[in-house]
Image: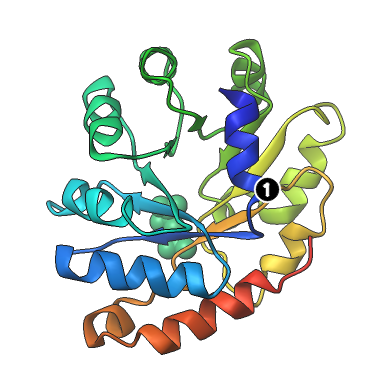
């Protein structure tokens, strides 16, 4: 599972974190992001429409849709059934990890402390999410963790935008970053797909 999660992180420098209220927005939004060069998409399970959104995005060619905010084994089952090809969680519990193993769902589980990273390593994961990135010490904290724990790579998320993404992407233990800035709510609601493609292209051009 860890190798498959790493593959997702290698697809692009940025994974858009999507909070979608209206399932009608799902397919055009996914197409706009893929067109801009961001194929891996995280749909958070934070809206009632999320599973329907995942189902619609899973049909979009060139996209690899995942489910974010996985908290329980039930979330894992529902996300997999909807067509999610990877999962993201703000943290990590043994039950959640076991459920993802059972379902064959690659997981980016959250870890920000040395002990949390060590627990993920023990579970066989060498890639994880670092959340909430900016308030957990930001790029400096990830760099420091890389001293004793260089085998763990991260996808930091939370408070990241175009302005500070480079601070993270320049680190050897950062594979990609996640963020919601590529799909602002107002642009999604206005159906500004061209604008979202431009934001995605800007993000896709970031160097790692
Ligand atoms: C997440 O769910 O990972 C974060 O809410 C995304 O953080 P951002 O909105 O600060 O980009």
What residue occupies the far left of the structure in this picture? 48
Residue at 59%, 48% in the rendered image: 136
Name the spot of residue 163 as percent of width and height, x first.
65, 77
What residue occupies the far right of the structure in this picture? 147
Residue 88: name its quadrant.
top left
- For the residue pair 31 and 111, the one nearer the viewer reads as 31
Residue 6: name its quadrant.
top right
Residue 206: name its quadrant.
bottom right
- For the residue pair 13 and 55, the one nearer the viewer reads as 55
Residue at 73%, 58% in the rendered image: 168
Residue that badge 1 annotates: 10
What is the number of callouts on the image? 1
Q: Quadrant of ligand 1?
A: bottom left
Q: Quadrant of the C terminus?
A: bottom right
Instruction: Check the image and report above or below for 26 versus 135.
Output: below
Instruction: Check the image and report above or below for 61 versus 89.
Output: below
Residue 8 in view in this figure: yes
Instruction: Check the image and report above or below for 195 versus 85.
Output: below
């Amino acid at each position: 599972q860890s190798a498959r999660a790493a593959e997702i992180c290698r697809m692009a420098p940025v994974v858009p974190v999507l909070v979608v209220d209206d399932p009608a927005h799902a397919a055009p939004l996914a197409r706009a992001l893929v067109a801009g060069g961001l194929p891996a998409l995280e749909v958070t399970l934070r809206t009632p429409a999320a599973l329907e959104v995942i189902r619609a995005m899973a049909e979009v060619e060139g996209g690899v849709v995942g489910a974010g905010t996985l908290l329980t084994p039930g979330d894992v089952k529902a996300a997999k059934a909807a067509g999610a090809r990877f999962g993201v969680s703000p943290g990590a519990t043994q039950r959640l990890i076991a459920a993802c193993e059972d379902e064959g769902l690659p997981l980016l589980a959250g870890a920000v402390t040395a002990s949390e990273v060590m627990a993920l390593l023990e579970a066989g994961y060498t890639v994880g999410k670092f959340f909430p990135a900016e308030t957990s010490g930001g790029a400096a904290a990830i760099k420091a963790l890389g001293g004793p724990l260089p085998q763990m790579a991260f996808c930091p998320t939370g408070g990241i935008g175009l302005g500070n993404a480079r601070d993270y992407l320049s680190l050897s233990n950062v594979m990609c970053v996640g963020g919601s800035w590529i799909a602002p709510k107002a642009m999604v609601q206005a159906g500004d797909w061209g604008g979202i493609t431009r934001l995605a292209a800007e993000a896709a051009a970031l160097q790692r």
